[in-house]
Amino acid sequence: MAATHATSPVYTKRVQTVLSTEQYELLLKIAQERGKPLSVLVREAIVEACFQGAVLQQRRAALQQLLSLKAPVADWEEMEKEITKGALDG
């Protein structure tokens, strides 16, 4: 079996913003304290501030869709037997 390696994303889009001198210096100080380039710090802040909430909302919506399927489910003992049998039978 081939090993899978996580690959770093390729960043191809540029975003520009204008900061005050104080904002820039504070961000630069934080980046230096964390041992990260300023660009990495800004990307991480964007992910945390904007994307994590959206991903959580998508996951909740997917869960609600699954729960609304009304799919037949056996009791736990029966499901456990089926899982064990499937694992043993390969």
Image (cartoon, rainbow, N blue to C red):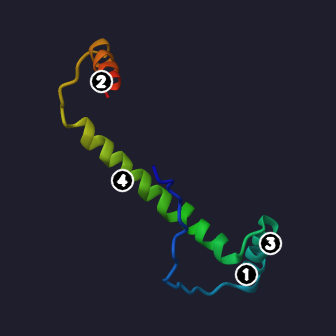
User: Counting residues from the N terminus, which is met first, the one under dot 2 or under dot 3?
Assistant: 3
Kindly identify which residue carries mark 3.
Answer: 32
Q: Is residue 17 left or right of residue 34?
A: left
Residue type, numbered disc 4: Gln
Q: Whole-percent x and y of residue 88?
A: 34, 22
Kindly identify which residue carries mark 2.
Answer: 89
| 11 lies above or below 78 | below
What secondary structure is found at the residue carrying circle 3? helix
User: Counting residues from the N terminus, which is met first, the one under dot 3 or under dot 4?
Assistant: 3
| 86 lies above or below 6 | above
Q: Nearer the viewer, mark 2 or mark 3?
A: 2
Residue type, numbered disc 3: Gln
| 55 lies above or below 27 | above
Residue type, numbered disc 1: Tyr
Q: Whole-percent x and y of residue 34?
A: 77, 65
Kindly identify which residue carries mark 1.
Answer: 24
Pick the residue in front: 28 or 79: 79
Q: Kindly report the distance in space between the C-alpha atoms of the residues bearing marks 2 and 4.
A: 36 Å
Number of the label disc, if any, that sits on residue 58: 4
Q: Kindly report the distance in space between the C-alpha atoms of the residues bearing marks 1 and 4.
A: 33 Å
Q: Whole-percent x and y of residue 77?
A: 31, 12
What secondary structure is found at the residue carrying circle 1? helix
Q: Nearer the viewer, mark 1 or mark 3?
A: 3
